[in-house]
Amino acid sequence: MKYGFFDDKNKEYVITTPKTPLPWINYLGSNDFFGIISNTAGGYDFYKDAKLLRLTRYRYNNCPYDSNGRYYYIKDNETIWNPGWQPTQTPLDSYECRHGLGYSTFESEKNKLRAKMTAFVPIKDNVEINKLELTNISENVKTLDLFSYVEFCLWNAEDDCTNFQRNFSTGEVEVIDSTIYHKTEYRERRNHYAIYHVNHEIDGFDTDRATFTGFYNSPANPDVVKAGVSKNSVAHGWSPIGSHHIKVTLQPNESASFIFLLGYCKNKKEEKFEAPNVINKAPAKELIAKYSTDEQVDTALNELKTYWTNLLSKFNIETGNEQLNRSVNIWNQYQCMVTFNMSRSASYFESGMGRGMGFRDSSQDLLGFVHLIPSRARERILDIANTQFEDGSAYHQYQPLTKTGNLNVGSGFNDDPLWLIAGTCAYIKETGDYSILDEECTFDSDANKKATLLEHLRRSFNYTVTHKGPHGLPLIGRADWNDCLNLNCFSDTPGESFQTTGPSSGPVAESVFIAGLFVKYGKEYVTLCQKLNLDDEAKACQKEVDTMIEAITTHGWDGKWFIRAFDANSNPIGSHVNKEGQIFIESQGMCVMAEVGVDNGMALEALNSVKERLDTKYGIMLQQPAYTTYHLELGEISSYPPGYKENAGIFCHNNPWIVCSETIVGHGNRAFELYKKTNPIFLEDVQDVHRTEPYAFCQMVAGKDAPSFGEGKNSWLTGTAAWTFATISQFILGIKPDFDGLRIDPCIPSDCDGYNCVRVFRGKTYNIHVTNPNHVEKGVASLKVNGTVMPSNVIDPTLGEDTVEVEVVLG
Ligand code: BGC
Ligand code: IFM
């Protein structure tokens, strides 16, 4: 069954039933203020940090699913309904939700009343705008009661859902005219509050949840709405909400619009306070004045749309394959922005409380984001570097608000440091801006300990060099990219084995994956040194890279594929000698991407083994055979039932590594076949199996050992977005930013005749026209820039004016 369709012209996905297999969500917000919104208007808002500054409450894993949102109730005689269907679930005469780029609309009809709710966060302000338009499409006058509803979160989302002994007594609100002020914490912090406002006179309000719903009712059947009369309740403790009541009369064909604002307000530091709990309303008034009329709101929405059109114009293809165009031009790039903004913090699978920004995750997210807004990528790289330790190791995560390392999670994931080299090199290749390397960054956020970014990268490189095990391979520490392969953990306490915060260096378990990662990004570090004329360092580092290649080919090769790791007793993992977990995807992908074994047949052999042993119709599984029992010495990986997550699930994040690897060995047909398997836009026909949003990549699809083979989970916040975009744009379509310019090196299916791409790169617009007259998979026969044949396939960025014409013939 299909639940909607793509509207490419408007860059929207149109959902035609509220009963999607899972809530299908969208993200609102571009800078500091964000909202998550489902196709039934569920979700919540936060300012900067989903854990610490949460405006509205959400109940994860609730029953029914997707509990809480920004809800509008319409009482039309005895019928009470919501334009987004939830929470009353009153059957609608028609329903349509459109998720667009940074906004969502809900348009529905009931008993000849049409409602359209448009939700978005304007680019410049910290507010979610809900514009609700009601139209009477009947022939009679309609007299209606409109009620709004949001439930406030007492700011710290974790504390909010655990510390009831305190929280039931702290809530404070104030209502002045049509503005509801949520001022819990103002007394103590004195600097921020939330508002919920409507640009209309109101007939009543409620701010106490139990009064609004009735103590034993829920938002699905609230007392106040049933009665059609607000109780003007003022919350003291318990659960503050915001609800307005407006009586509306509409003549036939008449429309009315209501602008609701849910905003975050903050005082300027220097402002004085009359009394601790009397809030300074100036910031609220300023915000309200900006979004009080339809014109103001429509202008802000248009600004948002223009913003996205401009961003997406930086990379745009025309390939004759509608699904590919849609994915590359719209949704994949959109998701790259979302992962850049959210890292792994807030989605319908990430509670917003657990994880902040990942050192590894955010570094990788840059690979798909850097072309969109390079200046923000620059800032992010420096933020990440600022948390690194002096010895080159790294906190695994940091908080978006404080930008300091997360002590609870700690460090010891030994791949982390190398990803900083990856992110920084992606930025320099995109922009040519080497000055970033001179920026001073702290160690562990300590202002007294600073060094240049280049020095940070040097320490990242050296961390691997100085942390090797008995086979000369990198020590794995707590884990590498695979968080769940915990080979140094021997806790006897059930459930603790994979959470041990042991020393990052060991005992001695080693990772062939980190070895491949070191070769790949170590080479890039060598190039950086060369560009900076650090010739001695470049030579010394190249020697280290060569030594690592030697260690991989000597000790990391199993005969038909790359071994995954050596455990703490130096036994191989991911080898034919193992009973289960004989072959893993990560070391095949990373070693071949690093071009290890490309010249001696190992790479081809490894990819063949992947095809034979790990491939399925929904993508490549992480490892095989799945672990059927729990192994203390392997850690979290074997805690999952076979086929789920790291235990032989299909990890969409690292499928692109195999796609890239296939392009490295020149297999364009195979690369594209694999690319499509994990791309939701190509999976529209199996939505009942796949279940997550058809417009967003998910982290994981259940592998063939799972009873729910093919089912996606953990959509949105995953490195899949960035890696898939890098793979399709740079490795398949072959438009690859490089240190010296734009490299053109496609590897495509042989039946492809060619394609066009507009690529904005270092301030110029390249119109790239690729033809494939001989139907090859790879190889540039000729490349012309503005009509002149070029000696190589790297376009010198100084050539041409603002617009550059590029003709590429494959052959
Ligand atoms: C894995 C989870 C694991 C977590 C531990 C994640 O990346 O996918 O399964 O629980 O890391 O930090
Ligand atoms: O590499 C990790 C990532 O950091 C978070 N999600 C799961 C991946 C594999 O364990």
Image: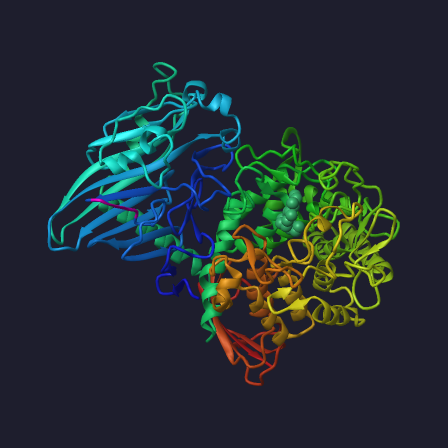
Q: Is residue 742 magenta?
A: no
Picture layout, residue 443 above or below residue 530: above
Q: Is residue 80 magenta?
A: yes
Q: How many marks?
A: 0
Q: Can you say whether 7 is above or below 384 in the image?
A: below
Quadrant for residue 490, please give it.
top right
Q: Nearer the viewer, residue 234 or 628?
A: 628
Q: Position of residue 212 (x, y in %)?
A: 32, 32
Which residue occupies the foreground of this view, 126 or 541? 126
**Mainly helix, strand or loop, the magenta region?**
strand
Q: Based on the displayed image, in which of its 4 quarters is residue 497 positioned?
A: top right
Indicate the quadrant containing the N terminus: top left, top right, bottom left or bottom right. Answer: bottom left
Using the rendered image of the protein, determine whether residue 746 is visible from the camera's viewpoint.
no
Q: Is residue 579 left or right of residue 374?
A: right
Looking at the image, the residue that sits furthest to the front is: 216
Residue at 75% x, 72% y is: 604
Highlighted range, magenta: 78-82
- Residue drawn at x 62%, y 60% is 707
